[in-house]
DNA sequence: GTCGAAATGTACTGACCTGACCATTTGGTT
DNA sequence: AACCAAATGGTCAGGTCAGTACATTTCGAC
């Protein structure tokens, strides 16, 4: 809300960067809430400090705005991931931390999840044209690849371990946990998505991923 | 296509059941392809043997049609699951089969997956009002609950094993594999979703679920 | 064969929504 | 202080789309 960035109000009026950012933020939330066709440019404009005119001035058309909002969502999430430093930890520990972090991070960013869901509905046609996003994701998997290599050198991870397949498994659990919460809790109740149960699922997921990666099974309670 | 049901062409014209079914089938594919707001009633009508008038006559409005199409999708999928008989197998084997089957079954029903994705985007508001769907899903989990109980009585499954949590894990992998294929393969390439790799992921998933359920780790190759 | 309810066809409306047009202001440059 | 490009405001045209009005046909019941 009152987060005044350095780009804000320099002279008085006319601050292109702040205007663009304002539009993007509103657009992200509107697209995430309603999907591409469900979102209304007029609604976005009205929730903005500026007018619809500016949206078309800066982003060309609705699709252009959507694509930029999608990129913004990825950027924000990957930014959070970048803060995580795992190089000083032993590989098993590092992997466990990464999984737990991803699980929590996805939960904390439902708008990002929704944007990816929407993009999947549209067969990733917009994402495919964005080299920005591809780069971001390749960077994200590098972190995992490093952990894998270290674990394999130490002999604690299996030789056949594939970072992309591992990323798939981590994403599957973390993503599904947010994306399918509405239908799942409509059917089975919402307890599974509240605190004690979420903790258990997260631990279960960490254990499962570790078991996949490790040559010797790590000790497990119960 | 040429699947002439007993309801087809009795006298000549006027066959309400066939008309409704025709509309539902087309609607399901249109909604699955384009989402709720993206779908066009006119498009649905034109792909039908009948007219838009009939859609409103039988289904009231767009939302009514959507809800019925969603139910139809669930019905079709649960029908396929019901054919699976696992009671004669030992619990571990039964669970392994169930996981592998679910994985394949989801892959074979992308329209169902897309409808559930869309419903999640809309916060399951339509699904919540459909007792038809809740019943179907409760039935689906009963099958899993039986396996769990048998395994626990035999002492091969952990006592704390929760059927709903297990269902969550099975669904997460099987669902994500279809739902996020577009974005995932746009970023990392499509090899992961083609034959040799899919087989590996499925096996990995089966192993992971079994490891979660079992007291003693089952033997694992490599 | 007549009658009424169910089923169906055609054309239309009113709202909505994207995108464009024309004019004006702002701020930096010379 | 004059000028120009960037930024902005207000308005509306053109098209789209969900839903409806009005009419006719079908078919089973009696």
Image (cartoon, coloured by chain):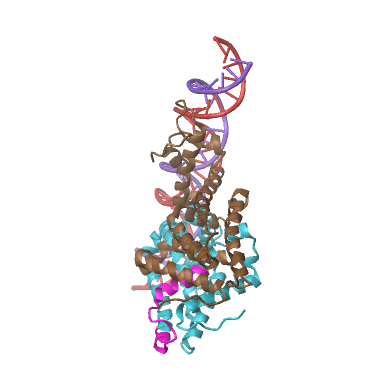
Chain colours: A brown, B cyan, C purple, D red
Give the magenta-colored segment's residue range. B149-174
- Left or right, A162 with reference to B93: right
Q: Residue at x 54, y 77 (%)?
A: A216
Q: Is residue A164 shown above or below A62?
A: below
Closer to us: A216 or A205: A216
**Residue A57: percent from the left, percent from the top?**
55, 34
**Residue B75: percent from the left, percent from the top?**
46, 72
Q: Quadrant of the C terminus of chain B?
A: bottom right
- Left or right, A188 with reference to B169: left
Is residue B81 part of the magenta span, yes or no?
A: no
Closer to us: A133 or B158: B158
Secondary structure mainly formed by the magenta segment: helix
**Residue A122: percent from the left, percent from the top?**
56, 55
Instruction: Say if residue B198 shows up in the picture.
Output: yes
Q: Quadrant of the N terminus of chain B?
A: bottom right
Instruction: Say if residue B54 shows up in the picture.
Output: no
**Residue B32: percent from the left, percent from the top?**
52, 61
Is residue B161 part of the magenta span, yes or no?
A: yes
Q: Residue at x 60, y 48 (%)?
A: A132
Closer to us: A80 or A124: A80
Q: How many numbered callouts?
A: 0
Residue A221 occupies quadrant: bottom left
């Amino acid at each position: 809300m009152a987060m005044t960035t350095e780009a804000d109000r320099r002279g008085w009026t006319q601050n292109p960067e702040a205007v663009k950012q304002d539009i993007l933020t509103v657009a992200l939330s509107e697209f995430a809430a309603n999907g591409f066709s469900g979102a209304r440019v007029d609604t976005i404009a009205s929730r903005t400090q500026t007018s619809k005119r500016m949206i078309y001035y800066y982003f060309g058309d609705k699709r252009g705005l959507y694509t930029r909002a999608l990129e913004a969502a990825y950027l924000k999430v990957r930014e959070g991931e970048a803060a995580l430093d795992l190089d000083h930890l032993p590989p098993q520990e590092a992997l466990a931390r990464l999984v737990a972090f991803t699980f929590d991070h996805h939960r904390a960013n439902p708008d990002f999840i929704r944007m990816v869901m929407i993009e999947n509905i549209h067969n990733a046609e917009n994402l495919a044209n964005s080299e920005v996003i591809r780069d971001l994701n390749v960077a994200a998997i590098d972190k995992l690849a490093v952990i894998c290599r270290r674990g394999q050198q130490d002999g604690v991870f299996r030789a056949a371990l594939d970072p992309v397949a591992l990323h798939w498994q981590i994403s599957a659990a973390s993503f599904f946990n947010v994306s399918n919460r509405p239908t799942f809790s409509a059917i089975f109740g919402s307890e599974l998505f509240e605190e004690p149960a979420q903790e258990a699922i997260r631990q279960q997921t960490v254990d499962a991923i570790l078991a996949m990666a490790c040559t010797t099974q790590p000790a497990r309670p119960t």
